[in-house]
Amino acid sequence: MATTSTTGSTLLQPLSNAVQLPIDQVNFVVCQLFALLAAIWFRTYLHSSKTSSFIRHIVATLLGLYLALFCFGWYALHFLVQSGISYCIMIIMGVESVHNPMMIITQKITSLAYEIHDGMFRKDEELTPSQRGLAVRRMPSLLEYVSYNCNFMGILAGPLCSYKDYITFIEGRSYHMTQSSENGKEEVQYERTEPSPNGAVVQKLLVCGLSLLLHLTISSTLPVEYNIDEGFRATASWPTKVTYLYMSLLAARPKYYFAWTLADAINNAAGFGFRGYDRNGAAHWDLISNLRIQQIEMSTSFKMFLDNWNIQTALWLKRVCYERASVSPTIQTFFLSAIWHGVYPGYYLTFLTGVLMTLAARAMRNNFRHYFIKTPQLKLFYDVITWAVTQIAISYTVVPFVLLSIKPSFTFYSSWYYCLHICAILVLLLLPVKKTQRGKNTHENIQLSQSKKFDERENSLGEDSFSPTNSVCSQSQGKASRPPSPGQ
């Protein structure tokens, strides 16, 4: 957060000094805790069964703008003005020219722009299944649009959600489920008792507390910057360098775990984020979750790490770039991600390195993995080796993302003799690379089951219909490929 309001700074300066955090970070935490309480109040007193969608839109928007004003001062008006300008562009230009520099709102505006374009300006047969499922068939009202962009649940830290999922939540239709019949050919509409998000919220808040504790106690003792310390580079052995690289980047992750998990908990506390029930009747509240910590830390491939890190940004990159690019979709996706993150040179170094690592990891996996899955012992050996290589490769790749500047980033890579860059290039030159198909991932399929319900009302009014997506239960069994996701 680049700008902090005077009032917020004055009120929270003692707290900032007490916990030794920058005032903008304290403001962020305080506002998110306020948003958590507001979410509980919103679900309790402004539930869709008690009030109209109009009131829910108004309150969600006003609370969001208040939080933005508290954190950013009058600069927060940029949120509203830019959203209004983009709304006018969508109407006048047919959704062809939308751009916004703010990260979360950029995602929402571009996502909605493509969804409207797919729903109103393209034929169904031209769309992929995911595009059909997310397509918006009518132009949102200005209130719906501003509420989607500026609601208090996601204005500070997201996560990104589809427009249709958000409107479904506001209108109270999140709990109308579909389930495949026994022959798998029909879908039956039914309504389940509204599940309570309390268990999911408490669990995520516990994760937040542990993540914050780790960030405050460990991050300062294992700074990433020490990797380029002159004395450390001159005296440390290679095993020491490798170990410290991994440990320092491991210590840098809890702040992301804290921010994203808290944002997820806020949405859940308001009643948003319900994905559906499994076959055992257990409710899942991960529709818009942004990460899976266990899978991240136990990743045995570059793809597995990226698939579970900043999930909603990865889906956004897939929807607006990867599946629409006609040439070099992987490279274009990484480049878009770098532009979206900002202007620091370290971002571009990270994503350029990420392209190499992703392509090299894909080539290694396609050429060697099948030799190691014949017995459990070989598979365990393969998993251990690939876990270690993945964690080091990820750490090596993202150091410039943390250092930001060009000189320290090159200092780090030169101290490692660009060894992983060279290895990745050799792998790509020496090993055959198989082309991969672009398919839907399981997480996105699950999200489409929520988006599908948005069109039921519009279809009844004579709007174009589209093929139904699979139910939550059937989708959870599916497996599909996913593009590399450079969201950081």
Image (cartoon, grey):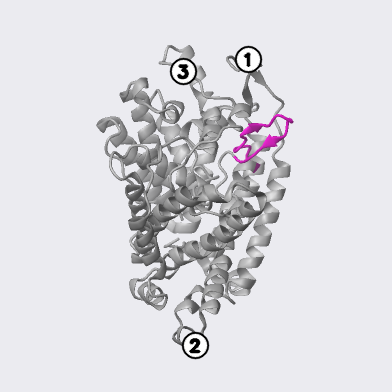
Q: Amino acid at mark 3?
A: Glu
Name the main secondary structure of what is drawn in magenta. Answer: loop
Q: Is residue 117 above or below residue 246?
A: above
Q: Left or right? Give the position of 124 relative to 481.
A: left
| Label 1–label 3 contact, CB within 8 A | no
* Residue 96 picture location, percent across and down: 27, 35
Q: Secondary structure at mark 3?
A: helix
Tell me which residue sits at (27%, 39%) in the image: 97
Asked whether 274 falls inside the magenta stretch, the response is yes
Most foreground residue, 391 or 323: 391
Q: Amino acid at mark 2?
A: Thr
- Give the number of the disc on residue 371: none
* Magenta residue span: 269-286
Q: Earlier in the sequence, mark 2 or mark 3?
A: 2
Q: Secondary structure at mark 1?
A: loop
Please name the residue that numbered disc 1 is placed on: 183
Q: Left or right? Give the position of 19 relative to 132.
A: right
User: In which image quadrant can residue 449 be found?
Assistant: top right
Q: Left or right? Give the position of 362 relative to 339.
A: right
Q: Secondary structure at mark 2?
A: helix
* Residue 72 picture location, percent across and down: 45, 58
Please name the residue that numbered disc 2 is placed on: 235
- Give the number of the disc on residue 458: 3
